[in-house]
Image (cartoon, rainbow, N blue to C red):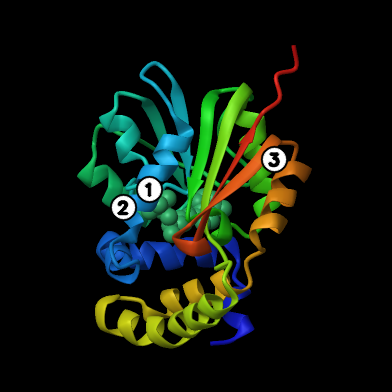
Amino acid sequence: MNRASLEKRPEEVAAMFDDVAPKYDIVNDILSMGQARRWRRIVVDAVGAVPGQKVLDLAAGTGTSSEPYADAGVDVVACDFSVGMLKVGKRRRPDIDFIAGDATNLPFADNSFDATTISFGLRNVIDPKKALQEMLRVTKPGGKLVVAEFSHPTNAVFRTVYSEYLMRALAPIAKKVASNPDAYVYLAESIRVWPSQDELAAWISESGWSSVAYRNLSGGIVAVHRGVKADTN
Ligand SMILES: C[S@@+](CC[C@H](N)C(=O)[O-])C[C@H]1O[C@@H](n2cnc3c(N)ncnc32)[C@H](O)[C@@H]1O
């Protein structure tokens, strides 16, 4: 595992997700030991969308993070730049609106969505601050931002055990279950270098979002950050 594995161009990130798309959801469930489902429920609750509202699920991949909104009668747009991931999603959920687009240059008008959310995707975006600004642009004044991302365990002992688990166990497990084990080496390394909870909160505020706060899940393995687009009235 080396730093070079993180120095990817956007096309290389898209191609990597095209490769993992067919087995993406099952590998996720195995590697997160079933926790992913609970994390996803908490994100949906934080978004708190109701039928009649419009939600952008950015870096939606195969649409697993978008499904609960569609199931609740919320108008959800699943946007991603990996055509491979979108194809798997569209095959499974033809009722969801899957749209190809880059998080740093979104194909949507200003003030289009009641809420914008991104689950386990911001870390993969080459310029995450630009994505946060784009999310602000397309969200309506008074609308919400919810970001779920892998983060850093708050307990020092657990943090050490966890990074050992990540660095050592992920690669061999991924070799057995994944079609592209290198993608999971990238996953472990990208989590290790991702900013802390407080740093990410600062990035979100600096990008123009108000009332920024976060909640740690599973001891900080995941953090859910929230923000609001200030109402200019
Ligand atoms: C780990 S998957 C998450 C998928 C989904 N949100 C979920 O929770 O299962 C990360 C996704 O981010 C997408 N992605 C990375 N950079 C992107 C960008 N600049 N614009 C749009 N999507 C991007 C990848 O194509 C991939 O599908």
| Residue in the picture at 58% in, 38% down | 106
Question: Which residue corresponds to the image point at 32% horizontal and 64% vertical from the top-left?
Answer: 28
Q: Position of residue 43 (x, y in %)?
A: 44, 43
Q: Say which element carries label 1.
A: helix
Residue kind at label 3, given as amino acid type: Gln
Q: CA distance from mark 1 to mark 2?
A: 5 Å
First in sequence, mark 2 or 3: give its number: 2
Please name whichever residue, 39 or 176, is drawn nearer the observer in this view of the structure.
39
The C terminus: image quadrant = top right
The x and y percentages for residue 63 are 34, 45
* Percent of width and height locating residue 150: 51, 62
* Depth check, front residue: 93 or 48: 48
Give yes or no for contact between labels 1 and 2 (Cβ–Cβ under 8 Å).
yes
In front of the other: label 2 or label 3? 2
| Mark found first going from the N terminus, 3 or 1 | 1
Residue 34 drawn at (x, y percent): 28, 62
Which residue is the site of mark 2? 37
Q: What amino acid is labelled 1 in the image?
A: Arg
Check mark 1 vs ligand 1: CB closer than 8 Å? yes or no: yes
Q: Is residue 109 visible?
A: no
Question: Which residue matches tag 1?
Answer: 40
| Front one among 94 and 119 | 119
Residue under label 3, please give it: 133
Q: Residue at x 51, y 76 (%)?
A: 158
Binning the other alpha carbons within 10 Å of mark 3 as few (below 14), some (14 to 19) or many (20 upward) gives many
Numbered disc 2: secondary structure: helix
Query: Callout 1: 10 Å neighbours few (<14), some, many (20+)?
Result: some
